[in-house]
Image (cartoon, rainbow, N blue to C red):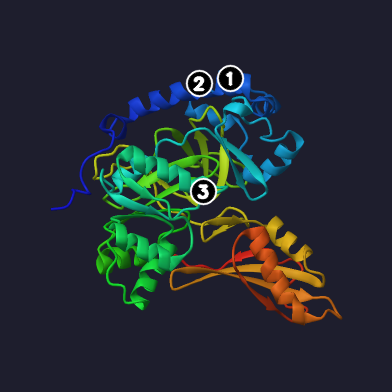
């Protein structure tokens, strides 16, 4: 008989604490975090001083609304002016442990990445599971973050990383991998390829998926057709894990080490409960103190009680982006990258990135118009190469007649539909 994957808590005292106790806990660590950042992170201090604030002004979660939201789009310029971290690192560089790099580039210091084991346990992982970790282990934190969490939980990790679908299948079957960690679309790719190869059923019993949306139709495919208990989490490279699903699948529980506020995407003002808005996070992280950080992701938070017994509020899924930045196959892309792709190919006069979805897979199309007299024969290969170099993704190129793309058109259009 296999393990009970649906019952119990990883840390009962924290996950089921009363709301008042959670508020006291968050107020305590917020006070320490703000004082530390004021003293050790000059970028945070400059930001607070510009708003006319001192640590005494940010004494509890509600007071955070006095500080303007920090946008991810601001970070490249801030870091360029004060390299490498823009003054947002709260310890000497020699103590940061690891430096990750997001597109921009944005440099993120992280010495240790704790907390994801709670999400894995809530989603069904148990000590003794053998898990293939298909997240990337280079530049971005997901691979190492889940590797460490799985091992803290008592699981065995096979660091397969991204790609190499047939190798993933061979390894999973050879070692009897009971768990999968990665994007939901890549899990579907592995399953589909195994069926094409007539490799027989994969041994996965449980999956933790992240970095892209999980449509309920795809979850049903995993669970009802393939017997894989599938739960999702939410986080970013800037803030780490912020929310995770429990067995009830009724939204993602917010972690106690992240103060999550739902705000108006334009003004940054707090919105009433149940309203759609931008997820703004303050995280308990003295090395990289992100305070009132705007993720750009839209969501709704539900404060009602969850049948699982956990007492935290729940994030009701990902509802899109507050700006033109979007995520494709787990990687953020933004208008500046589209501009860089176009700039690398002579003759491209107008351009637009279109993101679509078919058979649970993201597709990226770079539409472009060419200047008069441009030889179109060599454009597509050069644009494809630039997409790989700049966006770290593969995409197809569509050359369209001049006048097709309006001058005022958005640089990135997301046409995906999520059920």
Which numbered disc flags the more N-terminal residue, 1 or 2?
A: 2
Q: Which residue is mark 1?
A: 55
Mark 1, mark 3: which one is toward the viewer? Answer: 1
Residue 283: image location, x then y, percent: 50, 33
Which numbered disc flags the more N-terminal residue, 2 or 3?
A: 2
Image quadrant occupied by the C terminus: bottom left
Whether residue 170 is visible? yes
Q: Secondary structure at mark 3?
A: strand
Which numbered disc flags the more N-terminal residue, 1 or 3?
A: 1
Q: Residue at x 20, y 44 (%)?
A: 7
Residue 6: image location, x then y, percent: 22, 48
Q: Secondary structure at mark 2?
A: helix
Q: How many labels sit on residues?
A: 3
Mark 2, mark 3: which one is toward the viewer? Answer: 2
Q: Which of the numbered marks, if any, corresponds to residue 277? A: 3
- Badge 3 crowding class, 10 Å Cα cut-off, few under 14, some 14 to 19, many 20 or more, is many
Q: Residue at x 70, y 43 (%)?
A: 76
Q: Marks 1 and 2, how far apart in space?
A: 8 Å
Residue 212: image location, x then y, percent: 47, 57
Q: Marks 1 and 3, how far apart in space?
A: 27 Å
Q: Is 332 left, or right, of 8 in this rendering?
A: right
Q: Marks 2 and 3, how far apart in space?
A: 26 Å
Q: Residue at x 64, y 50 (%)?
A: 103
Q: Residue at x 82, y 70 (%)?
A: 346
Asked whether the residues under the numbered discs 2 and 3 touch, taking CB atoms below 8 Å apart as contact, a structural biologist would say no
Q: Which of the numbered marks, if any, corresponds to residue 31? A: 2
Asked whether the residues under the numbered discs 1 and 2 touch, taking CB atoms below 8 Å apart as contact, a structural biologist would say yes
* Furthest-right residue in this view: 373
């Amino acid at each position: 008989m296999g393990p009970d994957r649906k019952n119990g808590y990883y840390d009962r005292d924290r996950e089921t604490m009363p709301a008042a106790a959670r508020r006291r806990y968050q107020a305590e660590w917020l006070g320490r975090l703000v004082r530390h950042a004021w003293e050790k992170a000059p970028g945070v201090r400059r930001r607070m001083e510009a708003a006319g604030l001192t640590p005494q002004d940010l004494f509890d979660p509600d007071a955070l609304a006095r500080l303007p939201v920090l946008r991810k789009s601001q970070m490249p310029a801030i870091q360029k002016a004060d390299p490498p971290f823009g003054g947002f690192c709260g310890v000497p560089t020699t103590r940061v442990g690891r430096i990750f790099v997001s597109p921009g580039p944005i440099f993120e210091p992280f010495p240790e990445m704790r907390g994801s084991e709670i999400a894995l346990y809530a989603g069904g992982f148990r000590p003794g599971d053998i898990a293939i970790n298909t997240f990337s282990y280079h530049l971005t934190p997901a691979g190492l973050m889940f590797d460490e969490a799985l091992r803290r939980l008592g699981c065995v990790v096979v660091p397969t990383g991204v790609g190499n679908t047939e190798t993933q299948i061979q390894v999973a079957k050879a070692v009897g991998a009971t768990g999968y960690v990665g994007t939901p679309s890549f899990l579907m790719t592995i399953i589909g390829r195994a069926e094409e190869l007539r490799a027989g059923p994969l041994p996965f019993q449980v999956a933790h998926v992240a970095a892209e949306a999980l449509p309920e139709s795809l979850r049903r495919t995993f669970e009802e057709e393939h017997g894989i208990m599938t739960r999702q989490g939410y986080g970013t490279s800037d803030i780490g894990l912020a929310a995770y699903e429990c067995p009830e699948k009724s939204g993602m529980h917010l972690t106690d080490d992240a103060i999550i506020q739902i705000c108006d995407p334009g003004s940054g003002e707090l919105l009433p409960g149940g309203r759609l808005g931008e997820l703004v996070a303050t995280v308990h992280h003295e090395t990289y103190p992100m305070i009132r950080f705007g993720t750009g992701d839209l969501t709704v938070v539900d404060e009602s009680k969850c049948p699982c017994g956990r007492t935290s509020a729940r994030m009701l899924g990902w509802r899109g982006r507050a700006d033109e930045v979007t995520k494709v196959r787990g990687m953020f892309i933004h208008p500046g990258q589209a501009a860089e792709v176009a700039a690398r190919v002579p003759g491209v006069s107008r351009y637009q990135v279109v993101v679509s979805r078919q058979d649970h897979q993201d597709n990226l199309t770079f539409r472009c118009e060419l200047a008069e007299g441009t030889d179109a024969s060599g454009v597509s290969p050069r644009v494809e190469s630039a997409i790989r170099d700049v966006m770290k993704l593969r995409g197809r190129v569509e050359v369209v007649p001049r006048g097709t793309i309006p001058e005022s058109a958005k640089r990135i259009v997301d046409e995906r539909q999520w059920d």
